[in-house]
Image (cartoon, grey):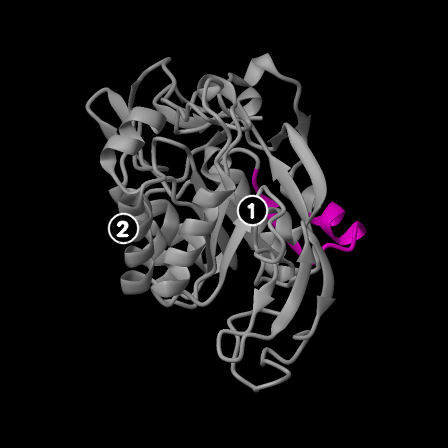
Amino acid sequence: MKKEVLTYAKVGDKLNCKVCERRCVIKKGDIGFCSMRENIGDKLCALNYGAASSVAVDPIEKKPLFHFYPGSTVFSLGSVGCNFRCKHCQNWNISQVNLDEIPTREILPEEAIRLTKQYGCKSIAWTYNEPTMWFEYTYDSAKLAKKEDIATVYVTNGYMSEESFDLIKPYLDAANIDLKGMSDKFYIDLCQARLQPVLDNIKRMYDEKIHIEITNLIIPGYNDSEEDIKALVNFMVEETGVEVPLHFTRFFPYYELGQLPPTPVESLRRAYNIAKEAGMQYVYIGNVSTGGEESTFCPECGKVIIERNGFDVVSDEVKEKKRCPTCKAPLNIIT
């Protein structure tokens, strides 16, 4: 289903897409970098409105969001396309293809909200591929979700435009942002993108009090140096605060980086320790069982307040209290 794009402008005989920071200028009959927006008769149209490639009921911890209604389920939808070209993409079979190359199911916003309620999910997430690739759909769905008291989630690379952010922010409750590295070289070489727009959007979400959690996939030889980790941690300490959850996750050889080894567990533990030493209150290790770094600890007294085994919540001492049951310290957890 096609729908007119919400944010674009005419530039001569071309159209300037303003959905993400690529800001493609598209001539008549052409498509943008993401392959999901086409200049049709001097109107910029989203080609994948309502086209879902992936649908599932997930634990919210899978996003990963560990501090946003922990232990709840989220109705998750993905579409097709991406504005990055990550060499290590885990979902390349939906993100790096055209719309006609894979089967999709039409799920319009009203149906998505109905299914979210039917499955008893606390929230709805646009995930699996970059949510701004079907921004118009997520925007319409998010407005409906708010009317039904359903929380809304983006799992995103953080490359949306400021114009898109201004539209979605009243309807967006939480986001996990993939901060892939801390240099333009990393983003250019591995993603064909730039770093600064991602940092800008992280700060915008934080300033607007959208619940955010940051994920950093540690890739051997690319972003795993002590300098890389310290730069990322320092950005968070200085720009978003020590209370924002930070997830270091393990890389496995995939897609165009199949020649690399998995991330050594020691690298993950080193990153974890660097973040904790810098004062980050909630740090996690993912994609590997390390024996404790998936659980949430009180930053004041060190008590385990949410114990996890993978994505499963084994015990939750917080529930509705939002305070440590032992020392009564306030916790950055939405329940």
Nearer the observer, 292 or 50: 292
State left or right for residue 239 relative to residue 242: left
Determine whether 134 is above or below 148 in the image. Answer: above
Would you name the residue on which mark 2 appears?
231
Describe residue 115's horizontal placement relative to residue 80 as left or right.
Answer: right
Q: What span is colored magenta in the figure?
A: 113-127
Residue that lies at the very extreme toward the left in this rendered image? 12
Q: Earlier in the sequence, mark 1 or mark 2?
A: 2
Q: Quadrant of the N terminus?
A: top right
Please tell me whether residue 118 belongs to the stretch shown in magenta.
yes
Q: Secondary structure at mark 2?
A: helix
Q: Is residue 48 above or below residue 64?
A: above
According to the image, label 1 marks what residue?
286
Q: Position of residue 264 (x, y in %)?
A: 48, 37
Amino acid identity at mark 1: Gly
Is 219 covered by the magenta stretch?
A: no
Labelled pair 1, 2 in contact (Cβ < 8 Å): no
Q: Secondary structure at mark 1?
A: strand
Q: Residue at x 38, y 44 (%)?
A: 179
Q: Amino acid at mark 2?
A: Ala
Q: CA distance from mark 1 to mark 2?
A: 20 Å
Instruction: Name above or below for residue 313 compared with residue 158.
Output: below
- Residue in the image at 57% along x and 35% along y: 128
Looking at the rendering, which quadrant does residue 49 occupy? top right
Q: Pinpoint residue 18: horizontal percent, then vertical percent.
A: 32, 36
Image quadrant of residue 275? Answer: bottom left
Residue 23 placement (x, y as % from top left): 28, 32
Name the residue at 58% across, 41% down.
287
**Nearest the camera: 93 or 172?**
93
Q: Position of residue 66 (x, y in %)?
A: 58, 58
